[in-house]
Image (cartoon, grey):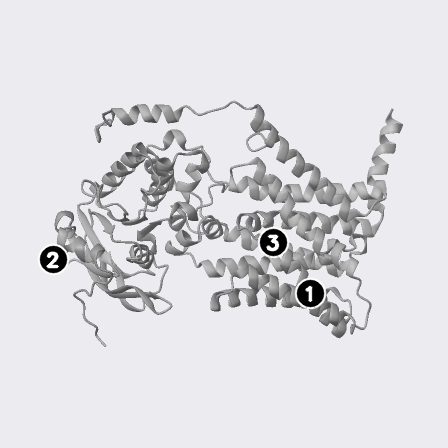
Amino acid sequence: MMNWFSHLLSSVVEPFDYAFMQRALLSCTLIGFTNGFLGTFIILRRQALLADALSHSLLPGLAVAAMIVGLSPEGLLLGGLIAALFVALGAQLMARNSRLKEETAVASLYIIAFALGIVLIRFAKVKVDLTHFLFGNILGVGNGDLWIAYGAAFLTLGTLVLFQRPLLLTLFDVAVAQASGVRVRWVETGLLVLTVLGLVASLQAVGVLLSLGLLIIPAATAYLLTDSFNRMLWGGAFLGMVCSVGGLFLSFFANIPSGPCIVMLMAVFLGLAYLFSPRYGVLSRLIRGHHYHEESLERWEGHQGHDHQIPEKE
Amino acid sequence: MSTPTDQEPMLRIEDLTVSYHRVPAIHHLSLTLDPGHCVGLFGPNGAGKSTLLKSIAGLLKPETGRILIEGITLEKAASLIAYLPQRESVDWDFPVTVRGLVEMGRYHQVGLLGSFSPRDQSAVEEALELFNLTPLARRQIKELSGGQQQRAFLARAWAQEADLYLLDEPFGGLDRNSATALASALKTLKERGKLLLVSHHSLAEAEPLFDTAILLNGELVACGPTQEALSPRNLECAYGTAIYSGNHHHSS
């Protein structure tokens, strides 16, 4: 019995014998948590598609960085950051100064940037693999990548926690937030910068597609489960972390690529929440026969009030 | 409207012009209003009712003139102003309960990271109580009737300790019961010395709630006690003719 148990334990711990696996696990935890946290803001701001567009606009920056400094993580980070910010802020500028709406401006600029990136990759000294760009290579995470993930996580979480209240006001209603003195444009731009940072920081480990998945799916799952902003925030982060780590383990034991494993695990949770969320699940709503009583009470009390007359029937 | 004292009126608008793409929506408008009034804002479509409310809320930049709240500029007076959003601009699926919504009103006082003091807590409770929302405090905001939703936003403004309430068509789409409840909530605010500025599409229901009326048609047609401001002659000016060349003069 003891023998069997220690055997199981050692096989679970086995992956950590490898340094590359330790680094993979650490970066997974960080990226999953940070992206899950940031996801709440992106979903409530309805910017899931903008994040998608931004993820593709990293490419020309990566290509230029690869041309100049090769495949160093710092160079790629800087290049991707500049390219995506160029697209994001450029689109905002275009939308404010012309009759083009923001989504039109974003879509145009990111497609242009992506095409430019593919052209530029041809001139890069080293071979840049598009599959790597989309799906990353979590087992190839180096110490430099890890430091970038630490930095990005620290900066993102710190900023979001510090400015949670103005962010919440802005997400809820831009006009009202602005009227009450919140500097809405700073908040919006800041959120955009953090999104780009999150995407770039997770590039090496999980690639832009999975990074996007970690940004959207855990927070969307949490959104289906709660009516509390705080629970959505921390729940999304926790779920993102759990799915990343769980997916990594699954991929190790089942010997399938880690990225799709993580996404599939997130998909399971999203599906469960979609069907069985106590309040908002599709199936739970069918079997629930619940209604509130305060309404009828209020109508009743309303008619007893002295402020107004009960409307007379004619 | 202003009583002749040396005290600053709650709201002073001087020579305000706001335009969209060079077409003025409000043209050289001046007026002053004192606290403790519920002011109806009337006029045909495109008369500048929403524009006026948004300008006072600081959402639109005036082309000429200025707006002062209790003698101070809009930027510094932001916490004194509560702008109630139009129904369409609110995301009713937002993960927030009625209590959470009212707590947002205290964010200005609490600051970025401060926690809610007993005083903040009691301000929230008081606001919920005042608008009969205490039994509904745990509800998500979509699970309220239209009238309850309006009251929830009023409660948030109350918790904010705002003095000037700006409401853009709050009665639109409300059934009769909800409208009556909202009207009595507005009356409560007025009796507590707040100034309410309410745009309203229907002249018929105007009389009992609004003690003061502003009649707009791009220009200021009239501002005064409801009966006088909405006199047949003034209404003819506002609604009868396309353009009313009002009693203003260009300074330049």
Q: Residue at x 79, y 49 (%)?
A: A22
Q: Chain of mark 1?
A: A
Q: Is residue A242 left or right of residue A235?
A: right
Position of the N terminus of chain A by quadrant: top right
Q: CA distance from mark 1 to mark 3?
A: 15 Å
Q: Is residue A249 above or below residue B79?
A: above
At 27% from the left and 35% from the top, the residue drawn is B180
Q: Earlier in the sequence, mark 1 or mark 3?
A: 3
Amino acid on which disc 3 is placed: Leu
Residue A149, located in which quarter of the rendered image?
Answer: bottom right
Quarter of the image where the C terminus of chain A is located: top left
Q: Which residue is mark 1?
A: A114
Element assignment for label 3: helix
| Along the viewing direction, whichever of A170 and A6 lies nearer the viewer | A170
Residues A105 and B43: in front is: B43
Image coords of residue A197 (percent x, y): 63, 59
Residue A56 in sight in this render:
yes
Q: Secondary structure at mark 2?
A: loop
